[in-house]
Amino acid sequence: MNKVIVLAKRPVGKPSLNEFKFINEEIPAVNDGEVLLKTLYISVDPYLRGRMNDAKSYVPPFELNKPIQSGIVAEVTESKNPEFKKGDLVTGITGWKEYQTSTGKGLTKIDKNASSLSSYLGVLGMTGITAYMGLIEIARPKAGETIVVSGAAGAVGSVVGQIGKILGCHVVGIAGSDEKVELLKSKFGFDDAINYKTTPDLKATIKNACKNGVDIYFDNVGGDISDAVMSNLNKHARIPVCGAISMYNSTMVPMGPRIQPIIVTKSAMMQGFIVSDFYEKFPVAIKQLSAWLKEGKLKYTETIVEGFDNTPQAFLDLFEGKNEGKMVVKA
Ligand code: NAP
């Protein structure tokens, strides 16, 4: 039998395991033009929370009692599609299923000899590319500038900070534990890092860590953390708004300081983006990220959760900060 994870009901506020349901299906027959995929790795991502709401967005909401979808790495175990053969490894966005058929549309073949298959969901996948696009295409850092990144020890944030260092910037990360702060400084080469959960005056601590002010704020979290960074901006600061995980489970729109006066007086530029806005440039980003990895300039860490059945819990754990780097499930 083939296990499938569906959205059983829409969460209100913080999601829980009650919103997920496991069902059993027959492993589907493969029709002409199709392949059968065996799931090897599943990406769990904060943005999936938004797709659980019945709300219009840049991607349609998940349908109730239909499989959740996210990025996966899979093996082709049977092929009736001339583009693929048995044993090929692929990545793409598909359902949370142990096995599934595909016409091949949206699947990309990956190197069978790759040292890490899961990296195609992280540093060489959506989150690595997001870091690259937000920083390089939107913020356009110059050597000597100061970058602050929130969600710094996560999949996107850890890559943002390292690219900032490669480009000669002063980089300060904000993360939610002393272990993450240590990881940022020791493994990823951040100049400084701040534990937002234990720092009594975040605004003053950021000011102290950024002696020359903040030129770029790469925002992954929104909320109070972003408010504290915004008051330290320099003139002509750039703020790529990548995500706002602190608000994804809010049922009320949270209120913070009005930021428009800061944007005006600092001649700052704040720009939201979705990584797919830069789809044409993905190959450039992947080539550069791969080169930096090979040269040892870029490092990564992953939190790999074992077992397909643990996929919903791995997703929930993102909101508790239980991951360092990319959170991935090994099915
Ligand atoms: P991640 O950072 O690997 O994992 C989420 C992290 O968020 C957790 O480890 C936790 O770290 C932090 N967090 C959770 N709740 C928080 C809260 N209430 N306040 C502050 N921090 C909180 O996830 P990711 O995949 O790299 O994504 C990071 C952000 O980028 C998310 O907002 C995501 O939606 C966004 N994103 C956007 C795009 C795009 O195209 N725009 C693409 C990918 C991701 P701590 O322990 O530090 O709290």
Image: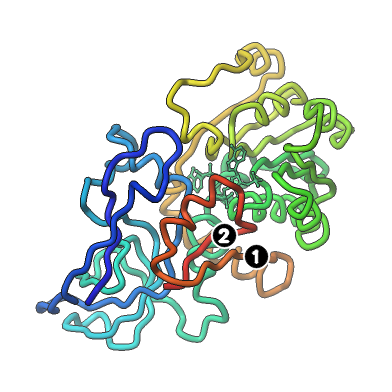
Q: Residue 222: give x, y in percent of width and height.
A: 59, 31
Q: Left of 130 or right of it: where is 310? A: left
Q: Which residue ends up furthest to the left in the rendered image?
A: 32
Ligand 1 under 8 Å from disc 2 Cβ:
yes
**Badge 2, how many Cα within 10 Å: few under 14, some, many 20+?**
many
Which residue type does callout 1 highlight?
Answer: Thr
Which residue type does callout 2 highlight?
Answer: Lys
Which of the 4 image quarters holds residue 89? bottom left
Numbered marks: total = 2
Q: Label 2 belongs to which residue? A: 326
Along the line of sight, the residue nearer the viewer: 260 or 13? 13
Ligand 1 under 8 Å from disc 1 Cβ:
no
- Contact flag, marks 2 and 1 (Cβ < 8 Å): yes
- Residue appearing at x 43%, y 26% in the figure: 251
Q: Secondary structure at mark 1?
A: loop
Q: Which mark is residue 204?
A: none
Q: Is residue 261 above or below residue 331?
A: above
Q: Secondary structure at mark 2?
A: strand
Q: Label 1 belongs to which residue? A: 301
Q: Left of 70 or right of it: where is 288? A: right
Which of the 4 image quarters holds residue 55? top left
Q: Which residue ends up furthest to the front in the rendered image?
A: 18
